[in-house]
Image (tube, rainbow, N blue to C red):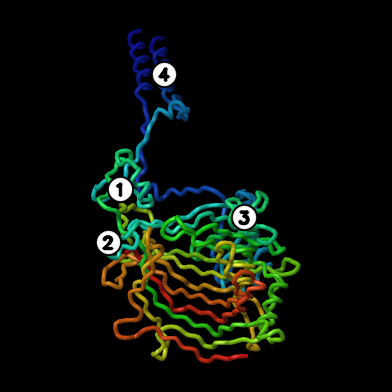
Amino acid sequence: MNNKIQLISLCALSLLSVYAVADLTPLNDDTLSAHVGQISQRAANDKPFQVPLLLSESQSAQTSPQNLNTQAPQSQPSAGITMDIDLQLHIDEIRWVDVDGAGPNGTQGAISMRGFSVGHLDSPIPQPAQIRGITVDVDGRDGLVIGVEQIGDRFGNGIDINIDSIQIK
Amino acid sequence: MKRTFITFVCAMTHSLFSFAQLIPLDDAALQESHGFMGHHIAFDALDANPPAEQNQPDSNALNQVSFFSGQVHDSQTYQSKNAALDALTGLSKDGLSLTQGIEIDLEIQASLDMQWQDNDGFNDIGDGTSGSLTLSGIHLGSHKGPITRQMLESDQPFLDSELAVINNLLIDLDSKQGMFITIEELGDRFGNGLDIIVNDIYLGNEQASAGGLLIENLSNFIQDKNLNQLNQTFGFNLSTLDDGKNTANGNWLPINAIVLTEEGSADTSVDLGLPSIDGLPSISTNTTIDASFAVYMDKVAWVDDGGEFGIADLMIYDGLDTNGDGIDDTVGPAKLTQMKIETIDHTAYNGEQVKALYIENLDFKADIAMGSIYVGNPQTGSLGSLHIKGLDTAGTSVWIYAH
């Protein structure tokens, strides 16, 4: 009799663990707000994160490095745009029209430039012409400053401009 | 009895010590998992001879999209409606089953300022002063009448109801051919396009304005009356292709663009100092852009102290000779073809090795008609009309880098 009771108890209790389940429930807002995360950004060589360049100079000056957990750069980085262009352009026709012509009883007239080409046109097959070092800066004192360092290459090949014909109609 | 009690205790403690531990997936397992978020956009590249059933749209998928004010477009209706226009653009969707995509209608009004800051100014000899290029008061909207001087100077030039309309902005995606973007209607069918006002442009500092900018009624709806005026001025006989919408007084010419990003070679990559992550695509990529468009603007002008210098009745398009008589007879779209953008190593003009943004093959083909170049008033201050035919910039490339 005792053995039977023991066996039934053992089976019942063994099955208890089989039916034991855990349910993952979402955290409520109060619990979530008690958790704080932090993302740190480090460069590959472990240098401190620096002030973004998008901040203007005045904003940079007002920003406390300690608040951003950063070190201010020693000097402002240089800024400005440089462009190099390989230029090749062709226009079949440019036509300027004077709708009312000349005088009170004038007749509409036009000047047409046909076969307008820009590039390096010496060779049988037109090639692009080189323009190097077009610099663009904006300066608080001088305004917008645009410079061009080199037009053409060092072999004397500049920009060729060719117009096949000019017609007055 | 003692044995029963021990058995009972052992069994109870067995469940107490049962536990499961959540462990992170390894990279291999993660790569086998795929996530999906957002709205359904499904495209399939077609074989050369696809089975008939492959072109059938998935009716279930059609009901899955609810995006802003957008909706899924039925590409079969869309393609049949625009087949002739698609042929004109050269941006064919042949071989691609555009079964579903996103279609967005926008009514928009926006205001913003833009500023480019140059911290060291013109620093040629080390005495530059920090400066900025500022576009102050950029406003986008749509006003039914002409833009007035008061509007050009106002911080709120448009009423709340004066919204710019962009209808049928279609976005389609393909893993091989890239992203297709189409704008069918920019503005309304009465010629009220987008108005863009820039109150002031400051060069260097913000003490004195260099003037403002105005773009009035930018639209891809080519009105018959405007086209007739240009025909008369330049002696053309251009017409627009039927857009299939039974639109009175003109036709729409859709604006199309294809943007395709491909993985580039390793030596053209830019080292951003980011760690390598298995399974993510390389950042060494180049982007190819094809685009086609035809637009008309009532006015593009520089505005200074109430006076204007600008271009009226400006149309950018590409004239097409559809009957082979050597004379352009149809307004087709201007085309930008296979323009590649990537970041590369470049030797600057002074011999320095720099990282540069490289725009390769700026191949743009267009005709440009300017009804009037004017000072003051387009009618009374006209300097004449100008037409540029067959503009072709193929072979032009640009490198942009810092100094």
- Type of amino acid at the residue the image marks with label 3: Ile
Q: Are marks 1 and 3 in contact (CB under 8 Å)?
A: no
- C-alpha separation, residue under disc 1 versus residue under disc 3: 40 Å
Residue receiving disc 2? B126
Question: Nearer the viewer's eye, disc 1 or disc 3?
Answer: 1
The Cα atoms of the two marked residues, 4 and 3, are separated by 63 Å
User: Do the residues marked 4 and 3 share a common chain?
Assistant: no
* Amino acid type of the residue that numbered disc 4 sits on in the rendered structure: Leu
Residue B257 placement (x, y as % from top left): 54, 66
State the quadrant of the N terminus of chain B.
Answer: top left
Q: Position of residue B36 (x, y in %)?
A: 50, 48
Query: Closer to us: mark 2 or mark 3?
Result: 2
In this rendering, the label closer to the viewer, 4 or 3: 3
**Residue at point 60%, 73% (across, down):** B374
Q: Nearer the viewer, residue A24 or A159?
A: A159
Q: Nearer the viewer, residue B353 or B386?
A: B386
Question: What is the three-letter code of the residue carrying label 1?
Answer: Gln
Mark 4 / mark 1, whichever is N-terminal: 4
Across and down, in percent, residue B71 comes to: 64, 53
User: A44 above or below A65?
Assistant: below
* Residue at image mark 3: B104
Residue A50: which numbered mark, if any? 1
Count numbered badges in the picture: 4
Disc 2 marks which amino acid?
Gly
Mark 2–mark 4 CB contact (< 8 Å): no
In the image, which disc is placed on residue A13? 4
Badge 2 marks a residue whose secondary structure is loop
Q: Residues within 10 Å of mark 2 (few under 14, many from 20)?
A: few
- Chain for numbered disc 1: A
Report the front residue among A12 and A140.
A140
